[in-house]
Image (tube, rainbow, N blue to C red):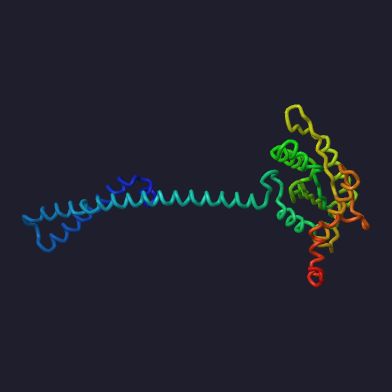
């Protein structure tokens, strides 16, 4: 019964409820009147009043309730839309937090979080840092939008070459991190060479019929279980520096004894500050 009533329009529901109320009022009034007063000349007047009063009450009340119900439906729909918008906004925020807005690859924080979560599952893992050679010249010669297109192109190359369980992210301006689970150092070096070769031979046209060859330098290091992230990044960065020092457009595998990248001048100046503060040179 409730299901059938709810399927009717508010006007029909009001009419049915008013009719039921009027019939019950007439029946109840007639029985009570006959029991107490019997049949007299005021009986039909009482019956008429018993019939009209429920209609006079239920019709305005039903219309008011219908109006309130309509408002409730509107509020429910707005609430549902607000929840949908909030869900989409949260998804967009999560997308921005976890993925690079330009290339669609993982963001720096998401890349390292994913790497830390996966490295404990396999004994042999590889970390790779890929850096675009002379990227500043691309921006200077062709403009930053063209430089962005170059980075997007590299992201496409990574997706095409790497496995679905490999992790790749943009960890700097023109620097990318690649984590290869269940991969030995020698295998990582081969994969790095495949990436380097594919990028070098990928057609990139900054302008119509103007081809520019993009090259990358890649530093590769295996991941020991006891190493923290700073040490891993240091090894990969040292291998990357070696690849650039050897002429760029090549892959270097980290080896103990490699020359690390020189520390920035401002770091050295900071190291000397305590000595300057306690010296007589002021």
Residue found at the far left of this picture: 41
Depth order, front residue of 149/183:
149
Quarter containing the C terminus: bottom right
Q: Is residue 144 left or right of residue 81?
A: right
Q: In the rendered image of this protein, does residue 83 appear above or below residue 279?
A: above
Q: In the rendered image of this protein, does residue 235 appear above or below residue 279?
A: above
Residue found at the far top of this picture: 209
Residue 43 percent location from the top left of the image = 10, 55
Q: Is residue 146 left or right of residue 90?
A: right
The number of numbered badges drawn on the structure is: 0
Residue at 67% across, 52% down: 98
Residue 84 percent location from the top left of the image = 52, 49
Q: In the rendered image of this protein, does residue 30 appear above or below residue 204?
A: below
Residue 21 percent location from the top left of the image = 24, 54
Q: Is residue 76 left or right of residue 240?
A: left
Depth order, front residue of 83/178:
178
Depth order, front residue of 63/206:
206
Residue 31 percent location from the top left of the image = 17, 59
Quarter occupied by residue 236: bottom right
Residue at 83% across, 40% down: 215
Residue at 27% across, 53% down: 61
């Amino acid at each position: 019964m409730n299901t059938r009533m709810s399927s009717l329009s508010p006007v029909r529901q009001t009419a049915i409820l008013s009719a039921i109320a009027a019939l019950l009022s007439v029946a109840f009034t007639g029985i009570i009147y006959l029991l107490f007063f019997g049949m007299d000349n005021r009986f039909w007047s009482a019956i008429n009043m018993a019939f009209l009063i429920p209609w006079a009450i239920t019709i305005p009340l039903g219309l008011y309730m219908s109006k309130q119900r309509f408002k409730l439906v509107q509020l429910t729909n707005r609430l549902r839309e607000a929840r949908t918008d909030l869900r989409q906004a949260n998804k967009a925020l999560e997308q921005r937090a976890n993925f690079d807005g330009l290339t669609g690859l993982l963001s720096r924080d998401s890349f390292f979080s994913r790497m830390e979560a996966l490295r404990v599952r396999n004994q042999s893992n590889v970390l790779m840092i890929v850096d675009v050679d002379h990227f500043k010249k691309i921006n200077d010669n062709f403009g930053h939008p063209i430089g962005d297109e170059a980075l997007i192109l590299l992201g496409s190359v990574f997706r095409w070459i790497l496995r679905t369980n490999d992790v790749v992210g943009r960890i700097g301006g023109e620097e990318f991190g690649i984590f290869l689970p269940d991969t030995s150092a020698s295998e990582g070096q081969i994969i790095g060479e495949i990436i380097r070769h594919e990028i070098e031979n990928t057609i990139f046209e900054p302008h119509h019929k103007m081809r520019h060859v993009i090259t990358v330098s890649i530093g590769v290091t295996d991941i020991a279980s006891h190493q923290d992230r700073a040490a891993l990044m240091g090894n990969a960065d040292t291998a990357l520096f070696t690849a650039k020092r050897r002429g760029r457009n090549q892959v270097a595998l980290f080896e103990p004894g490699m020359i690390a990248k020189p520390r920035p001048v401002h770091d050295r100046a900071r190291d000397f500050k305590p000595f300057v503060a306690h010296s007589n040179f002021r």
